[in-house]
Image: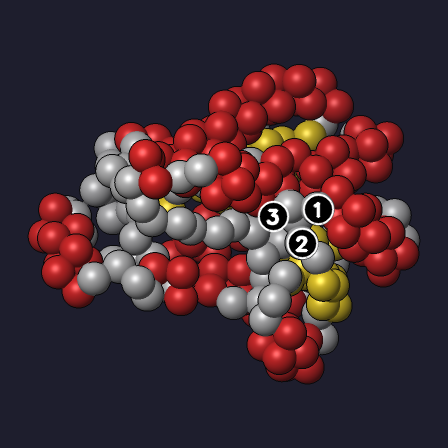
Amino acid sequence: MIKSSNKNKKVLITGGSRGIGAEAVREFTGEGSSVAFMYRNSTQKALELSKATGALNIKCNVASSPSVKAAMDVANEFFENEIDVLICNAGISDFGLFTDFDEDRWGNMIETNLNGVYRCVRAVLPGMISRKKGSIIIVSSMWGQVGASCEVAYSTAKAGLIGMTKALAKEEGPSGIRVNCICPGLIDTEMNAEVSKEAQEDIIYDTPLSRIGTPADVVKVMKFLASDQSGFVTGQIMGVNGGLIM
């Protein structure tokens, strides 16, 4: 029997109570990783997921610096100040015309989807640097690569994550830390439930693999990037979109 390359790793996942994040919690605990996950609002789902997997749930709003600091204190105590893998998955969506976005609405998107990643990465980096190892996985979006009409704020934040990945990979590579980015396409999650059936059908028609993605499709790539099998992979932007964006 082949042992999983993520066995006994200490994995922290943001946005872990549902969708892609919840699938990641299930998969990494199933491989024998020690897992803690953050969530913002879905308390009942977080409790159920913890009960099912043994993972630690931590309430946290990544858009708030004090909330992230408090959550990281809990995570570091749980992991004994050793986090091997950080998966930055927390995010929100907001559809609307650019001209309808006031500064508060725009700022909420940037604070959560871009600055939230900054806060979490900044919190774990000192420990990774001191141990000379670590894998940081940032979840962006295909819209961060090509932009989407009526999702200018979302596309802007997600594009920022791509730039962050490339620059941080160069900066932290000498410390043995790998930084990679996953850009999912349309994935079957609650966040995308508001995408109309007609819009989904249009995307499927334009997708070479002729389907939308599943959380498992994304998590398989996360598991690879977390593992030692990807030990020479850093600064990469990996699309999980069925070939829609090439």
At 62% from the left edge and 53% from the top edge, which residue is drawn? 14
Crowding near the residue tagged with mark 1, few <14, some 14–19, many ≥20 C-alpha atoms within 10 Å:
some
Q: Is residue 180 above or below residue 185?
A: above
As rendered, which of 158 and 212 lies closer to the eye? 158
Percent coordinates x, y for residue 235 in the rendering:
52, 26
Q: Amino acid at mark 3?
A: Ile
Per the image, label 3 sits on a secondary structure element best described as strand
Residue 237 left/right relative to 187: right
**Residue pointed to by mark 2:** 61
Residue 203 left/right relative to 224: left
Percent coordinates x, y for residue 45 in the rendering:
58, 76
Which mark, residue 87? 3
Q: Amino acid at mark 2?
A: Asn
The earlier-in-sequence mark between 1 and 3 is 1
**Residue pointed to by mark 1:** 64
Percent coordinates x, y for residue 92 in the rendering:
48, 51
As rendered, which of 94 and 10 lies closer to the eye? 94
Per the image, label 1 sits on a secondary structure element best described as loop
Q: Amino acid at mark 1?
A: Ser
Which mark, residue 170? none
Q: The C terminus appears in which quarter of the rendering?
A: top left
Crowding near the residue tagged with mark 3, few <14, some 14–19, many ≥20 C-alpha atoms within 10 Å:
many
The earlier-in-sequence mark between 2 and 3 is 2
Per the image, label 2 sits on a secondary structure element best described as loop
Q: CA distance from mark 2 to mark 1?
A: 6 Å
Percent coordinates x, y for residue 117 in the rendering:
62, 39
Q: The N terminus appears in which quarter of the rendering?
A: bottom right
As rendered, which of 190 and 168 lies closer to the eye? 190
Q: Is residue 189 above or below residue 205?
A: below
Q: Is residue 100 above or below residue 160?
A: below
